[in-house]
């Protein structure tokens, strides 16, 4: 999919708006053949530094097997709908693009698993705004550039600012 295909769609999905305040979410991770791998609940909170167009967003995934994963994002808005992101377990930086109701986000992260293990995974996530308080994400996770799982995530904004 090309991000430009979403230019005329609404409502706008702007990370610097959506990820500010408190959020909750739910996720399921499926294998490519459709089997359920994991479920999770998500709690998040973000703050905007308007002077630098930067969002600090912390989200914690609590998985059905009991392990948790907390991500500490710093997301910076650039020019022309471009975004970059840092997180303490990333390889390099996350790269994002926004147009209309969509936001496309790609990164590679050393991702904790149950039992204390971790794997370097490639993520390719598409966020779609449903309304000002809700978005749905369809993402893929893989290793060495080969996807092996699909994630379906729903976020709901609880408070702003």
Image (cartoon, rainbow, N blue to C red):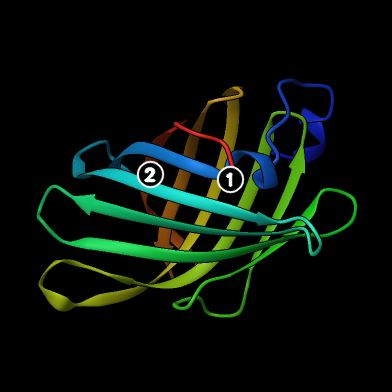
Q: In this view, does 41 lie above or below 84?
A: above
7 to 45, vertically: above or below: above
In terms of depth relative to the viewer, which is nearer, 125 or 60?
Answer: 60
Which residue does the image show at 41% across and 49% down from the upper left? 44
Contact check, label 2 and label 1, Cβ < 8 Å? no
Asked which secondary structure carries label 1, the reply is: loop
- Kindly identify the residue that appears in the image at 70 percent across and 40 percent down: 14
Give me the C-alpha separation between circle 2 and circle 1: 26 Å
**Residue found at the far front of this picture:** 161
The quadrant in which the N terminus is found is top right
Which label belongs to residue 73?
Answer: none
Residue at 34%, 63% in the rendered image: 70
Res 69 → quadrant: bottom left
130 to 77, vertically: above or below: above
Residue 125 appears at what percent x and percent y? 54, 48
The picture places residue 107, in percent across and down from the top left corner, at: 56, 65
Q: Which residue in the protein does label 2 denote?
A: 150
Q: Is residue 60 above or below residue 137?
A: below
> Where, by quadrant of the figure, is residue 96 drawn?
bottom right
Q: Which residue is drawn at 22% across and 52% down?
A: 62
Quadrant containing the C terminus is: top right
Q: Nearer the viewer, residue 5 or 44?
A: 44
The residue tagged 1 is: 20
Q: Position of residue 32 (x, y in %)?
A: 33, 44
Of residues 41 and 114, the one nearer the viewer is: 41
Percent position of residue 119, x then y: 31, 74
Q: Can residue 30 be seen in this view?
A: no
């Amino acid at each position: 999919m090309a991000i430009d295909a979403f230019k005329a769609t609404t409502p706008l999905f702007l990370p610097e708006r959506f990820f500010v305040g408190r959020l909750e979410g739910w996720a399921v991770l499926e294998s490519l053949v459709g089997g359920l791998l994991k479920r999770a609940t998500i709690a998040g909170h973000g703050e905007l530094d308007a002077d630098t167009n930067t969002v600090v967003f912390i989200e914690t995934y609590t998985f059905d097997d009991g392990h948790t994963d907390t991500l500490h994002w710093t997301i910076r808005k650039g020019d022309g709908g471009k975004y970059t992101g840092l997180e303490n377990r990333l390889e390099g930086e996350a790269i994002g693009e926004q147009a209309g109701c969509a936001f496309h986000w790609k990164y590679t992260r050393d991702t904790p698993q149950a039992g204390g293990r971790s794997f370097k995974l490639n993520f390719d996530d598409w966020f779609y705004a449903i309304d000002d308080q809700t978005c749905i994400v369809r993402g893929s996770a893989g290793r060495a550039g080969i996807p092996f799982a699909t994630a379906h995530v729903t976020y709901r904004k609880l408070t702003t600012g």
